[in-house]
Image (spheres, rainbow, N blue to C red):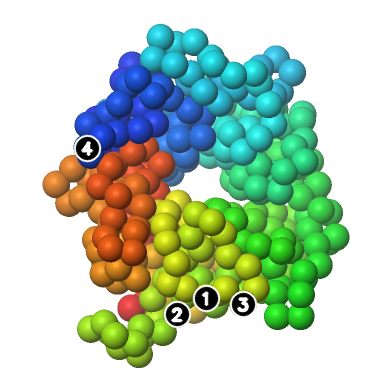
Amino acid sequence: MFDHLSALTDARGLFEHARYAVPRPEHGYCVDDVARALVVTAREPAPDARLIGLHRRYLGFTVAAVADDGRCHNRMDVTGRWTDQPGLGDWWGRALWGLGFAAARLPDPADRDRAADAFRRAAARRSPDLRATAFATLGAAELLTARPDEAAARGLLTDYLEWSRRWAPTGPQWAWPEPRLGYANAAIAEALIVAAHALGDDAGTARGCDLLDFLLRVESRVDRVGAGTGARLLSVTPVGGRGPGEVGPAFDQQPLEVAALADACASAHRVTGDASWLVGVELARRWLWGDNDSRTIMLDPDTGGGFDGLTRTGRNENQGAESTVAALVIVQQACALPVTP
């Protein structure tokens, strides 16, 4: 399951890009991908020695990215040199996401404490970006569940919940708090669901579930031509985004978007106990295995790598870090839950 992720990893971190299944070290590493890989390896329930080695490498990279003032680097070249200035973009949020999961779930107490220390440092800052804050909130919710006295995590959750109260639909038929869908959209809804649940805010949980339900309706359609004619399939937001009145299929579709839906639906099921959310996880699994707008399998069964994008005529054959982690997320969620066909 983790063979290709391991092949993309060296002693320093996770290579961002691949040419087909071959890593491209010249493009270096980024926290965006390493932190995602930290999440997916940290939540494996029974890690073997190889997996422990991977998540320790990803933890070390992510901890090193967090500056003393809580901002975060994103990009490192193959020599180990950071090539950017620390900031509060998506990578800052993803670093907190990874560190929160690591602090809550890694088997070694020393690793958990190291992750928690870096989490507190980064959590002292706030980002003006919605997605960065949503990613950070996902890590904070996981950490607070494991450590109920973790004030830094509680502060992030409280702020995200307060922010969500100011959201408003941007049109009569558009319940989303943004005028257009972007990427990893489901993370925004999932963060609200888990933050509200952790803080005992039932109304917030319901708002998050309503957003996720809206997103699932926008990002799926009835199959009118395939073998499963009449059933639903995912037809997710393409790289250019999607706004009111825009319908699919549209391309290129990114595995990251499907993985975010799988994660969000799994969290909604865990929080509410409502089995109807399992349908979203199953739709994500089916998308990965070819029940999608191009009838194309998006996981390489030989390497374990995820393909980089679904196109109108097939797929991008490269198997980079983002798409490989996304495929692993979908497989993890499908295997962990009693998925309803």
What residue is pinned by disc 2? 221
Q: How many numbered marks does the figure carry?
A: 4
Q: Which element carries disc 2, helix, strand or loop?
A: strand
Which label belongs to residue 247?
1
Which label belongs to residue 269?
none
Tell me the distance, in whole angstroms, between the alpha carbons under discs 3 and 4.
38 Å
Disc 1 versus disc 4: nearer the observer: 1
Tell me the distance, in whole angstroms, between the alpha carbons under discs 1 and 2.
9 Å
| Residue at image location 62% in from the left, 38% down from the top | 90
Question: Which circle's residue, 1 or 4, is located before the other in the chain?
Answer: 4
Q: Is residue 327 left or right of residue 187?
A: left
Residue type at tag 3: Gly
Residue type at tag 2: Arg
Observer-nearest of 250 and 131: 250
Q: Is residue 7 left or right of residue 108?
A: left
Q: Residues within 10 Å of mark 2 (few under 14, many from 20)?
A: many
Q: Is residue 220 above or below residue 199?
A: below
Question: Which circle's residue, 3 or 4, is located before the other in the chain?
Answer: 4
What residue is pinned by disc 3? 245
Tell me the distance, in whole angstroms, between the alpha carbons under discs 3 and 2.
14 Å
Question: Which circle's residue, 4 or 2, is located before the other in the chain?
Answer: 4
Where is residue 266? Give x, y as percent.
49, 63
Disc 1 versus disc 2: nearer the observer: 1
| Residue at image location 58% in from the left, 65% down from the top | 242
- The answer to which quarter of the image holds residue 340 is bottom left
Where is residue 137? Give x, y as percent.
67, 46
What residue is pinned by disc 4? 21
Question: Which circle's residue, 1 or 2, is located before the other in the chain?
Answer: 2
Q: Is residue 12 left or right of residue 248?
A: left
